[in-house]
Amino acid sequence: MTARLHNGSSHLRLGVNIDHVATIRNARGGYHPDPVRAAVLAARAGADGITAHLREDRRHISDHDIARLSREIALPLNLEMAATDEMLDIALRHKPNAACIVPEKRQELTTEGGLDVAGQMDLLRPFVEKLKAAAIRVTLFIDPDRAQIDASLALGADQVELHTGTYCDTQGEDRARELERIQSSASYATQKGLEVHAGHGLSFETVGDIARIAEIHELNIGHFLIGDAIFQGLEASIHEMRRLMDEARGDAREEKKA
């Protein structure tokens, strides 16, 4: 199974999600391990940005973490957030480079599927408008679906992040079909003028075909990198992910030339 190459950006950005460094810290309390230190290491290892998801129940990233990341990290900060007044106030106070609006349920272990933008236009519109008015780039986390892309465009989003969880969780023909959905959606969103990102569940084994889709400008990866870091260290894990992404993007460029 090989992804097609489309016209697009040659450099694929890597956003490293540091949430689960905070998950480990919070399992025992205190200050160790420090997610801000993880962000510093990620920058040194070649990350292009830092992603953090401040959840309503503060299960991992805390308000203090967001304040420190905003002050101490030079890389762009991508704040993942639910569409709530509390999260909007926090985003407007700290003014991250980007805010990615995601669906959130208190009982879920991780984000489950994309945001239903098409079905929540009235709810989401004021959040998008206020974030954009504050010069915060707005990303909507969606399933690879044209109706959701059209709705995201209608709301004025700058970017969409395509949910790759289904692709990562399937095998064989099911994975091939999901990859085609992601490819088609990335191409369609680009034609509509949206910048395309992707993420959720990506690993060393699954990142290659997604990285080959040249319309995708950024991958956001967290849980796998933090888990792999237990065995080889965070910098080594990020270096390897960066290598695999660059290798896949380079191979795709060479195939296009041929």
Image (tube, rainbow, N blue to C red):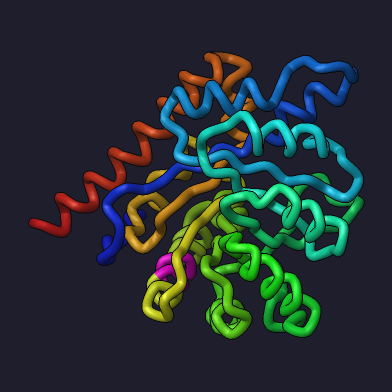
Picture quarter with the N terminus: bottom left
In front: 154, or 23?
Answer: 154
In front: 152, or 240?
Answer: 152
Secondary structure mostly seen in magenta is helix
- The answer to whether residue 180 is visible is no
Q: In this view, does 243 lie above or below 233?
A: below
Picture quarter with the C terminus: bottom left
Coordinates of residue 94 in the picture (x, y in percent): 71, 47
Coordinates of residue 86 in the picture (x, y in percent): 87, 57
Give the residue at the far left of this rendering.
258
Coordinates of residue 145 in the picture (x, y in percent): 56, 76
User: What residue do we see at 54% from left, 56% from top?
Assistant: 167
User: What residue do we see at 16% from left, 59% from top?
Assistant: 256
Tell whether 35 sits left or right of 104: left
- Image quadrant assignment for residue 147: bottom right
User: What residue do we see at 52% from left, 69% from top?
Assistant: 158
**In magenta stretch: residue 185:** yes
**In magenta stretch: residue 137:** no
- How many marks on residues? 0
Q: In this view, does 223 lie above or below 212?
A: above
User: What residue do we see at 73% from left, 54% from top?
Assistant: 91
- The answer to whether residue 82 is visible is yes
Which residues make up the magenta segment?
A: 180-186
Q: Is residue 107 above or below residue 19?
A: below
- Image quadrant assignment for residue 59: top right
- Image quadrant assignment for residue 72: top right
Q: Is residue 221 above or below residue 39?
A: below
Coordinates of residue 241 in the picture (x, y in percent): 43, 33
